[in-house]
């Protein structure tokens, strides 16, 4: 049982380490340079990823595929021991590794990279704009949208797509996504957000005083949400 648990706990870090060192060794042996921008996991990152490799339902499903008897009619040899070892591995990894994962991550000093988070958000923004452009073609045919309104909406989405593409290029190159954002521009963005917050608070006061129905409040809040969405995202700086 101890051997089974030891193999399970050691196999993942060994495999992760191999996937990091083998490609580099092959490229070096063939005389090829390392790919531009390539990043390999550090030892601490490998340790954290290894500790996150808990076992659960897949391991149990796999072990229960063992037949009760062999083709000769005899009981499958060692089946109960294999089941017990699998249960032991699942319990120790789920409970032991699961409860200590946060502590291990903190002890290893592994933190989320803000640049990676900004890249993911911008990729999601770009994907959402492309989905909007695709849906726009369907709306134009089904809803008979007037030409000028359709042109304006498409131009707005195209502008967003170009802007996000520029941000992605800068982020992938390791640069600031908004290098042209001067302190004055950032201050203006913050001021506009503060104004929108004040407008929301006033609308809520109107609603609480009974002067504004909830349905009208939702409409006006959506208008403010739209104004805020077109501002420069403030979580990528």
Image (cartoon, rainbow, N blue to C red):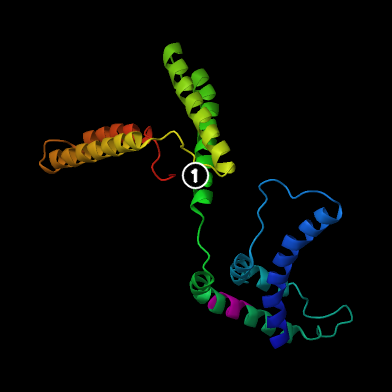
Residue nearest the observer in this picture, 68 or 28: 28
Span of residues in magenta: 90-95
Q: Is residue 8 above or below residue 141?
A: below
Q: In this view, does 98 lie above or below 114?
A: below
Give left or right: position of 42 versus 221.
Answer: right
Coordinates of residue 99 in the picture (x, y in percent): 50, 76
Residue nearest the observer in this picture, 91 or 121: 121
Give left or right: position of 183 versus 175.
Answer: left
Residue lying at 69% horizontally and 87% vertically, measured from the top left: 2
Quadrant where the N terminus is found in the figure: bottom right
Could you tell me if residue 144 is visible in this image? no
Residue nearest the observer in this picture, 84 or 37: 37
Residue lying at 79% horizontally and 61% vertically, measured from the top left: 22
Which type of secondary structure does the marked residue at label 1 adopt?
Answer: helix
197 inside magenta stretch: no
Coordinates of residue 106 in the picture (x, y in percent): 49, 70
Residue lying at 20% horizontally and 39% vertically, measured from the top left: 198
Coordinates of residue 176 in the picture (x, y in percent): 49, 41
Q: In which quarter of the image is residue 184?
A: top left
Could you tell me if residue 71 is visible in this image? yes
Residue nearest the observer in this picture, 31 or 73: 31
Give left or right: position of 69 versus 115.
Answer: right
Quadrant where the C terminus is found in the figure: top left
94 inside magenta stretch: yes
Which class describes the residues within 10 Å of circle 1: few (<14), some (14-19), or many (20+)?
Answer: some
Of all residues shown, which one is farthest toward the top? 147
Residue under label 1: 121
Coordinates of residue 155 in the picture (x, y in percent): 47, 20
The dominant secondary structure in magenta is: helix
Residue lying at 43% horizontally and 18% vertically, measured from the top left: 152
């Amino acid at each position: 049982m101890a051997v089974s648990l030891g193999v399970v706990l050691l196999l993942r870090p060994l495999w992760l380490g191999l996937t990091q060192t083998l490609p580099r060794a092959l490229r070096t042996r063939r005389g090829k340079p390392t790919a531009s921008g390539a990043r390999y996991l550090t030892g601490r990152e490998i340790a954290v990823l290894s500790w996150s490799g808990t076992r659960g339902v897949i391991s149990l499903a796999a072990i229960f595929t063992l037949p009760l008897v062999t083709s000769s009619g005899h009981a499958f040899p060692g089946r109960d021991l294999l089941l017990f070892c699998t249960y032991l591995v699942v319990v120790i990894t789920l409970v032991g590794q699961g409860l200590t994962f946060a502590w291990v991550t903190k002890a290893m000093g592994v933190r989320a990279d803000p640049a990676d988070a900004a890249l993911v958000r911008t990729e999601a923004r770009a994907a959402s704009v492309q989905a909007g452009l695709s849906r726009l073609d369907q709306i134009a045919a089904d809803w008979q949208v007037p030409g000028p309104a359709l042109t304006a909406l498409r131009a707005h989405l195209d502008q967003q797509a170009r802007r996000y593409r520029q941000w992605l290029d800068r982020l992938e190159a390791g640069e600031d996504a908004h290098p042209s954002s001067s302190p004055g521009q950032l201050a203006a963005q913050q001021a506009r957000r503060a104004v929108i917050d004040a407008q929301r608070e006033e609308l809520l006061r109107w609603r609480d005083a009974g002067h504004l129905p909830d349905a009208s409040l939702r409409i006006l809040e959506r208008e403010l949400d739209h104004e805020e969405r077109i501002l420069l995202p403030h979580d990528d700086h």
